[in-house]
Image (cartoon, rainbow, N blue to C red):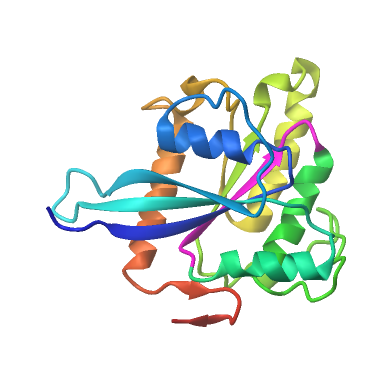
Amino acid sequence: MASLDRVKVLVLGDSGVGKSSLVHLLCQNQVLGNPSWTVGCSVDVRVQDYKEGTPEEKTYYIELWDVGGSVGIASSVKSTRAVFYNSVNGIMLVHDLTNKKSSQNLYRWSLEALNKDSSPTGVIVSNGDYDREQFAENPVPLLLIGTKFDQIPETKRNEVLTRTAFLSEDFNAEEINLDCTNPRYLAAGTSNAVKLSRFFDKMTGFTDRKRFNFKSLHYD
């Protein structure tokens, strides 16, 4: 059997948004019963078929790198975390739909990963003053994932979904909203499953060109 190609995906977002639960669901197709805080980085693997059912079909190992920590912390910690940002093929930006701050912090996570945040505290941004042009030429596929969808009161869902639509536009990325304790949100044939598959196809196609080295901002 031929060896499988490896693809690296960063999973970024604030502590407590459910990154570990999401990664477990994506890789094991099971709910994570007792999630714990991620220290440093945790890696899990998903097997993915690229362009399944076509002559171009190819199987990949998708490595999901769940990066722990919080933005706006000491520069020494961020410098240590930067080693995880080398040679990636895609990024999942994860936020808690019940926590607006975790959504706003995705801008800062992106800036950190792209090595554009040179100060220890970063740049506080919001939908109103975010300059989307700074990522206009970003070649790496992005996917926006909102967790804890089940915890949003019905009366606030339209407001929350409007906010996530702005995020999606800013990052030029498709969005998936789900509950990591319920696999049906990613069931085959659902819009979420289609978006996820499209992201993986785009990302695995990207590996055939180059991997992007965020730290030094060049192709290797």
Tell me if residue 131 can be seen: no
Q: Which residues are magenta?
A: 88-99
- Measuring 58% from the left and 73% from the top, which residue is drawn there? 214
Residue ID at (37%, 27%): 189
Coordinates of residue 45 in the picture (x, y in percent)? 41, 46
Residue 42 is situated, as x and y percent measured from the top left of the image, at 56, 49
For residue 78, which quarter of the picture? bottom right
> Relative to the observer, which residue lies in front, 165 or 29?
29
Which residue is at a point 71% across and 66% down the rendered structure image? 112
Viewport quadrant of the C terminus: bottom left
**Which residue appears at 72% of the width and 36% of the height?**
96
Above or below, comparing residue 132 to residue 43 in the picture: below
Residue that sits furthest to the top in the current view: 154
**How far across and how far down the image is residue 132, in percent?**
71, 64
Residue 93 part of the magenta-drawn span: yes
When the figure is inspected, residue 161 is found, relative to residue 112, above or below; the finding is above
Q: Is residue 162 visible?
A: yes
Q: Is residue 2 magenta?
A: no
Choose top left, top right, bottom left or bottom right for residue 94: top right
81 vs 31, left or right, is right
Q: Is residue 43 left or right of residue 136?
A: left
